[in-house]
Amino acid sequence: MKRIAILGSTGSIGIQTLEVAREHRNDIQIRALVAHSNIELLERQIREFMPRIVCVYDDKKAKLLKENIKDLSVRVETGMEGIIACATEESTDTVVAALVGMIGILPTIEAIKAGKNIALANKETLVTAGHIIMPLSREKNIELLPVDSEHSAIFQSLHGEDKNNIYRILLTASGGPFRGLKGQVLETMTASDALKHPNWRMGPKITIDSATLVNKALEVMEAVWLFGLPIEQIQVLIHPQSIIHSMVEYVDGSIIAQLGLPDMRLPIQYALFYPDRKDMRLGERVDFVKLKELTFEEPDMDTFYGLQLGLRAGKLGGSMPTVYNAANEWAVARFLEGKIGFLDIPRLIEEAMDNHILINAPTLNQILNTEQETYDFIKGIVKFGK
Ligand code: NDP
Ligand code: MG
């Protein structure tokens, strides 16, 4: 029996985690749920799965929820302390880290300290604090299992192999909704254009990250930490059908890949039951005859230079990935509000990176300060009203 906490239960990954839990009621118990403010959905989840504790980050919404579920004996907490209480709830063994953004760092660290296994969707955590999280995971002897589909694919393609025999990792990317477009056209793209991802239905932030290819740079950095490889050994490959979720090429030229339809419930379920495999009763299965073709291209790093900037941030290391990530989080939020243009996202990231003085091996406080300084810097340079 798995006893889990879901940080971000009302989001895309959280909802799909609960779908997996619903299918495996005899094997999974939900002990804690966390959301930001969507108390309507959270209440339905509480009534169905009966966790012991929940957290609503927004204080007013937390009070409202408390009132609405006073017939139940479920503890309702709020704020960062509440998230951490859920992440460290004593009866859980696994925490699904599915908050969006750097807010996920602290609760993930606290969960690891409390000895919980982590099913990690929140890539921003590893990108910014991988040098803290990886040694801590080893020290605490916990499992840090990837939920991100590419990393799940790489993880599955590495089983039984010697890491020294890896030639390179081929990290696949769909290319997003704007694949093939060039500069001028991209300037005019709005949030609703960018939210139309061809293959995956995900939360808004990662969907924009997929359109800019920033998501892929974050995933390269995530892979560096998870698999302990130099960034130069990871190559991004555009694969528009999103059937091959990533591959590992070995020194002898053999390539091992993991394939499946684009459905996050598969990597979520794999992370929850690893090393076991369970029946997947949801969704469809790959039919190669219907697929007909799998194609590949090189990423267009000039047009989507958010990817190029991310690889630069990853190579520089230290606090630079935090600047890259924080600048992106800020810019994506403003782009979703319609306040800046699509190409302003990489522009702002670049300015923030150019302005930053690198800190090597930053402490958690330095990471959080760098995040705040990046927001302050961008707020100082950006002029709204195009
Ligand atoms: P969503 O935006 O769909 O969901 C985010 C979740 O986090 C929601 O439950 C939201 O609550 C909650 N949340 C956000 N901020 C806070 C806060 N301050 N306090 C408490 N809860 C908060 O995101 P996704 O599910 O798409 O993505 C989650 C993470 O997983 C991201 O890091 C993403 O990169 C990664 N990921 C996602 C994939 C996907 O297919 N969606 C694939 C691979 C990785 P509320 O609903 O109340 O706002
Ligand atoms: Mg991914």
Image (tube, helix red, strand yellow):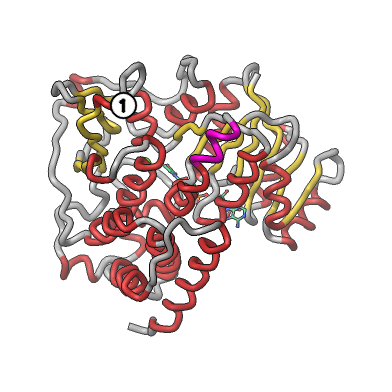
Q: Quadrant of the N terminus?
A: top right
Pick the front one: 137 or 375: 137
| Percent coordinates x, y for residue 364 in the rendering | 56, 57
Q: Give the tally of numbered discs.
A: 1
Seen at 49% across and 15% down, the residue is: 276
The amino acid beneath tag 1 is: Lys
Numbered disc 1: secondary structure: helix
Vertical placement of 186 versus 94: above or below? below
Identity of the residue furthest to the front in this view: 360
Seen at 30% across and 25% down, the residue is: 258
Query: Which residue is denoted by mark 1 in the rendering?
Result: 163
- Would you say residue 93 sits in the magenta stretch? no
| Circle 1 crowding by C-alpha within 10 Å: few under 14, some 14–19, many from 20 | few
Is the residue indicated by label 1 positioned so its CB lies within 8 Å of ligand 2? no
- Can you see residue 211? no
Most frequent secondary structure within the magenta stretch: helix
| Percent coordinates x, y for residue 71 in the rendering | 86, 41
- Can you see residue 160? yes
Q: Quadrant of the C terminus?
A: bottom left
The image quadrant that residue 249 belongs to is: top left
The image quadrant that residue 163 belongs to is: top left
| Percent coordinates x, y for residue 4 in the rendering | 64, 31
- Would you say residue 137 sits in the magenta stretch? yes
Task: Please state the quadrant of the image where ligand 2 appears.
Answer: top left
Vertical placement of 374 versus 306: above or below? below
The image quadrant that residue 165 belongs to is: top left
Seen at 27% across and 27% down, the residue is: 164
Pick the front one: 227 or 17: 227
Region in magenta: 134-140
